[in-house]
Amino acid sequence: MRFASPWLLLLLLVVPVVVAFLWWVDRRSARYAVAFTNIDVLASVAVARKSTWRRFVPLALLLLALTFAATAVARPNAAVSTALSRATVVLLVDTSGSMRADDVKPTRLGAAQAAMFAFLDRVPKHVRVGLVSFSTSPQLLVPPTTNRIIMREGVDLLEPESGTAIGDGLQDAVNTVLASVGRAAPRGKGGHIPAAIVLLSDGAQTRGTLSPIQGAQLAKNAGIPVYTIALGTKNGVLRDSQFGFGFGFGGGAFPVPPDPATLAEIARFTGGIAYQAQSAEKVQAVYQRLSNTVTTHQQRREISSWFAGAAAFLLLGSLAAGKVTGERLP
């Protein structure tokens, strides 16, 4: 929480001043109470008053009311999450042959598909979601839509193919986003438009015209943050039985480690966040987190009214407590 006029927080000094004043008044009243002629009655009254905590309730509520009122004057503001209007999210998915690897169960692609299904269940219904896959070249499978049935069908049809063209995939995803939100879409804080790309890949670039950073530059220029997920473990391999098109090895196993460094650079360059997922549970958790992250944005909102309302409520509570307990401020 921040304050537009932090120097006005000096008004909080009123609280200890009031406490000191009330203490002085209470002591002064006690000094004059010695003139009471019936000492036994006076003692019983004093003991009764000191034995109950209720006499302090009105005072405590009043001091809290003063604290909240002084804070409200300093114009506090806080960062709050608000839903992006006309938001578009493009899921950019690596469908290279290495997605057959089973170091992430049941396979890397199978785990990614399950996580994307969960993402579609959680993302707000007004958000348009599209699907772009890439291997040797990118392919737009589902243009951005609010129809989750079509999106689920598109995710279900994903199949591992051959190479990895990350840069070209980013270019296709950027064009897909701009076709959805418009090239003149308003930019918010940080220069971002109401859109995001979620890039999942399990390896280094092996194909394509554009490099990953060139693709990231296109996203940055368009104001689109790219959130990246490096899927797989460093010990992941493809065995003979898993080799598909693009692999021609005669035996043994071919290592297929992910490339988190490149994906992290893409995210940093475009203003997104980079994640790593070494298990099906982890990739599920990442997509669930992204279902909120990529569809909301943080903005600062003044919350003085909250504190002023709390101060008024506490003041009324102090008066009510005084009526109920029969106590009043000294």
Image (cartoon, rainbow, N blue to C red):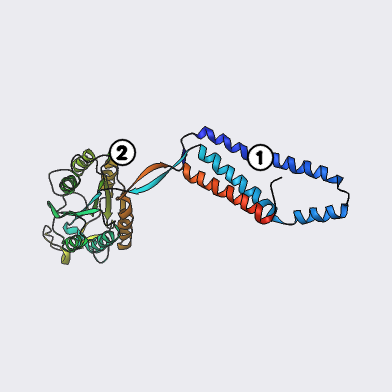
Side of 254 relative to 1 (left or right): left
Instruction: Look at discs 1 and 2 and give the one toward the viewer.
Output: 1
Location of mark 2 (residue): 190
Q: Residues within 10 Å of mark 1 (few under 14, many from 20)?
A: some
Residue nearest the viewer, comparing 133 with 181: 181
Residue 232 appears at what percent x and percent y?
27, 58
- Which residue lies most toward the top here? 7
Q: Answer left or right for 240 relative to 269.
A: left
Percent x, y of residue 200: 24, 53
**Numbered badge on residue 144:** none
Work out whether residue 35 or residue 28 is closer to the camera in this orientation and state it.
35
**Which quarter of the figure has residue 10?**
top right
Q: CA distance from mark 1 to mark 2?
A: 45 Å
Circle 1 — which element? Answer: helix
Mark 2 Cα within 10 Å, few/some/many (few <14, many 20+)? few
> Are discs 1 and 2 less than 8 Å apart at CB?
no
What residue did someone put label 1 on?
18
Amino acid under label 1?
Val
In the rendered image, residue 63, in percent from the top left (x then y), is placed at: 62, 45
- Residue 286 at what x, y percent from top left? 32, 56
Q: Is residue 112 above or below residue 86?
A: below
Residue found at the very far front of the displayed protein: 323
Residue type (three-letter) at the residue carrying disc 2: Gly
Quadrant in the rendering for residue 147 = bottom left
Closer-to-camera residue (87/215): 87
SS under mark 2: helix
The quarter of the picture where the C terminus appears is top right
